Image (cartoon, rainbow, N blue to C red):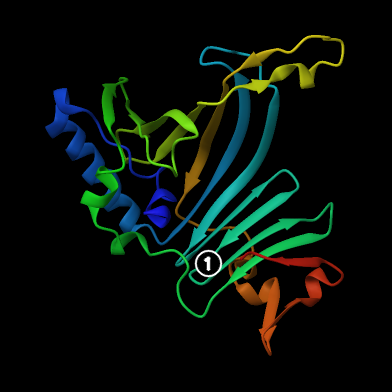
Amino acid sequence: MKTIALYIIAFLISGVAVAQNATDVFENYLEQKKKESNFQVDITYALYKGKEGKKAYESYKGVQAGSNDAVYQKLGDMELIQGKNFIVKLNKEEKAMLVGYSSKPIVPQLNQIDNTKILQLFEEKILKDEGGFWKLILTSNTSELSQFSSVELLLDKSNYTLVKQIFNYSAVSDFSQYDTSKTEQDLNNPRLEITYKNYSNTVKIDSEVFKSTHYFSYKNNKLSAASTYKGFEIIPIN
C-alpha cells in the first residue's frame, strides 16, 4: 500500500455525483501516463499560508524529466532520481547523497498497479469542470496520505497532462519563522502548489542523469560515490 501511495499525484478521481465522468477522466489520464516513456517539464514549487493565501513564503524553480524506467527532478540545489531499482537524493551544497539500492525493483511500474487498489485509497473524491481543465480533489485517511487534508490535481482536458498540484497540509506550521520581526507565533496550515509548464515528450537533459552509475557504484556490499561526486558523503536509505 505504501508504494501505491507514491503515485497519489497521478491518480485522483471524482466523487459519486459524477462517477462515470470522473472514471473516464481517471482512465484517460492513466492510459496517457502508461504510454508515456519520455517527458520533460518545467516545475515551480511555492509554499503558501492557508487555503487562500496569496504570498509565497518559499518558491523554487526546477525541471522534471522521465526516461523509460527512471524519473529525474531538480529543484533549487536538490536533485532526486528514482530508477527501477535505485533512489538517489543529492544535496550538492552539503556534498551529501542519500542512496537506496536493491537488486529487485524498489517501486512497481505504473502498469503493474491494479487501478482498484488506487481508488480504495480515497474516501472522498470530487470532480470539477474548470473550462479547459479538469479539477480533481481527494481526501484520504490512510497513513501514507494523512499529512494532507486534501490534494488537488488540475489536468488539461485536451491531452490530460498535469498543469498543477495542490497539497493542503493537515498539520499547522509557524509562519513567523519567515519574519524575524514577529514576536508571536503565526500558526496556519501550509499549502504547497506545484505548477507544470512547457511540457514536452522530448528529453533535453543529459541522459546520464537517469543512470545509477552516474551517482554511485555497488561492489562487495559497499556503496561508493562515482567520480562525478567524489568526496560526497553517501548515506544509505534503510
Q: Is 28 placed above or below 233 here?
A: above
On screen, residue 162 versus residue 76, left or right, reads left
Q: Nearer the viewer, residue 140 or 228?
A: 140
Q: Is 164 placed above or below 62 here?
A: above
Q: Which residue is mark 1?
A: 83
Q: Nearer the viewer, residue 124 or 58?
A: 124
Q: Nearer the viewer, residue 130 or 136?
A: 136
Give the farthest residue toward the bottom. Answer: 220
**Residue 28: x %, y % from top left:** 24, 45
Q: Is 149 placed above or below 145 here?
A: above
Residue at 45% from the left image edge and 72% from the top image edge: 105
Residue at disc 1, secondary structure:
loop
On screen, residue 192 versus residue 119, left or right, reads right
Quadrant assignment, res 26? top left
**Residue 184: x %, y % from top left:** 78, 9
**Residue 100: x %, y % from top left:** 60, 67
On screen, residue 14 versus residue 11, left or right, reads left
* Picture quarter with the N terminus: bottom left
- Give the mark count: 1
On screen, residue 127 versus residue 143, left or right, reads left
Q: Is 68 placed above or below 154 here?
A: below
Residue at 83% from the left image edge and 9% from the top image edge: 183
Quadrant assignment, res 146? top left
Q: Nearer the viewer, residue 166 or 139?
A: 139
* Picture quarter with the C terminus: bottom right
Query: Given the image, on which type of amino acid does mark 1 rest?
Result: Gly
Q: Residues within 10 Å of mark 1 (few under 14, many from 20)?
A: many
**Residue 156: x %, y % from top left:** 35, 33
Residue at 80% from the left image edge and 55% from the top image edge: 92
